[in-house]
Each structure stands twice: as structure tokens, then as C-alpha cells.
Amino acid sequence: MDGMTKAEIDKVERSDIVPGNGPKRPRDAATLILLDRRNDEFLVLMGRRHRSHAFMPGKFVFPGGRTDPADSRVPVASALTAQDEEKLRAGTGRVSAARARAIALSAIRETYEEAGLLIGRKGDFSTGKPDWQGFVRHGVQPSLESVRFVARAITPPGRVRRFDTRFLVAWRSDVAVELDGGGPTNELEELAWLPIAEAKQVDIPSITRTVLEELEGRLARDPGLSPGAAVPFYRLVHAHFRRELL
């Protein structure tokens, strides 16, 4: 799909990301879409970013942030499925297995930090990594087997910050511990479980709305989110916004 020019993208996203000067290499980032099912309706967890933030202030987003390569060395109760690991490694700038693992674990860690939700299995857990001490204290072993890779998007050039973001999905039933009052960083000032149709109507970045539409279609075809399905990849190529499949 290449029906949007760079000028059109700029117009759509002007309120999402402040333009910046000079080329910037996109940084790896991961975001986690937590899903819950209520009868025939799917709900997603979203939070509002503080209005004081330089990046997307006041927007509703999924928990997530920049990938920390050190996350690849955190022990897990279960690994990514081979199919989803391969999808994470595919596409432009093919990544290593360790980097794919770091991307997925970064999404898990950020969900704890921003939303106070620890995804994994109850059990003894030990690591010296400072950012994972919440999992140690609460006895949760991070788990990746139910995590699904559902979309990828690279921020167009000319923005104040650029990210190569992988959107992953897990289920509310994968949450082993839910902390009262949210996560330790307090980065999201509101947390809410919203039906997907409602989530698309709140103040969200345009790419988030696009990913929700993609996820809605995938859930209609495959409510259990089988591993290894085709993953839409959005990026700017020769001044046109393209949708490719990984």
C-alpha cells in the first residue's frame, strides 16, 4: 500500500510527533498490546502519556519504550515461539536471535515499569539486572511463549525522535502479578481497558490506530492469535508510505 506521500504523512502526523532537524537513525523500540476478552469483544490496555512529555504528550498509548540490549540476557520461563522469533528477525536490518529476544523482553519490562503488570509465571526468579528487580521481589519468571508479534513501524525521517517499533501482543491471563497504583515509573497517568472500537476513537497516534485496525482484522480471522502469521510492516520508501508483509 503506497497511496500516501511524505507530505501527506506529515499532515496526518503533525500532532503526533514534533519535527526535528537533521537525519536520525531509528532506535529499536517495543510496545505491548495487552488483550482481554469479554464475551465476543476484545479489550486492550491503554494509558495516557503525561502532557509534560516531549514525545507524544497527552496521547493514549500502549506500554512500551526503547529496547535495552541487556534484556536479551534475562532468564525466562519460556522462549518465544520459533515462528514469532523468525518474524522478529525478518525484514530490513535483519536482527540476531539475541536482539529479537531483547525486543520481546523489553516490551515485558516496560509493561511492568509503566503499568505495574508482571507477565510470566509465579516462581523463584533471580537476576542482577536492576530493571528486573520487581520480578525478583514478586517472584515472577518472565515468559514469552504466548507473546505474538503483530506489527512493525519505523518513524518517518525528519522527526525529533525516530523508532523502529515492534508491536507485540500478550493476554491479560498472562499477567502473574498486578500491582496497585501502576508501575514504578509513573509514565502513564491513566490506565484503562477499552474495547478495540472505542480505543480507536480516543486521542491516539495515527500509527496506533492503524495497528489496532490490523489487529482487529487478525483477531476476526484467528481469535487465538496463532504464531507465525503475516506481520504488516509500515515504513517510508522513496517518499511513499508503504505497507509490506513480513
Image (cartoon, rainbow, N blue to C red):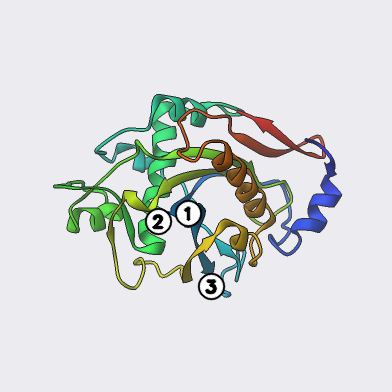
Which residue is pictured at 30% across the width and 41% down the height?
A: 143
Q: Is the residue marked by circle 3 packed among few (<14), some (14-19), or many (20+) residues within 10 Å?
A: some
State the residue position of label 3: 50
Q: Earlier in the sequence, mark 2 or mark 1?
A: 1
C-beta proximity under 8 Å, tags 2 and 1: yes
**x, y (%) of residue 194?**
52, 63
C-beta proximity under 8 Å, tags 2 and 3: no
C-beta proximity under 8 Å, tags 3 and 1: no
Residue 141 vs 95, above or below: the answer is below
Q: CA distance from mark 3 to mark 1?
A: 14 Å
**x, y (%) of residue 113?**
37, 60
**x, y (%) of residue 232?**
63, 36
Is residue 26 visible in the rendered image? The answer is no
Of circles 2 and 3, the one toward us is 2
Q: Is residue 130 left or right of residue 210?
A: left
Q: Is the residue marked by circle 2 packed among few (<14), some (14-19), or many (20+) residues within 10 Å?
A: many
State the residue position of label 1: 64
State the residue position of label 2: 111
Q: Which quarter of the figure has residue 1?
A: top right
**x, y (%) of residue 31?**
49, 50
Q: Earlier in the sequence, mark 2 or mark 3?
A: 3
Which residue is pictured at 40% across the width and 49% down the height?
A: 171
Residue 244 vs 176, above or below: the answer is above
Q: Earlier in the sequence, mark 3 or mark 1?
A: 3
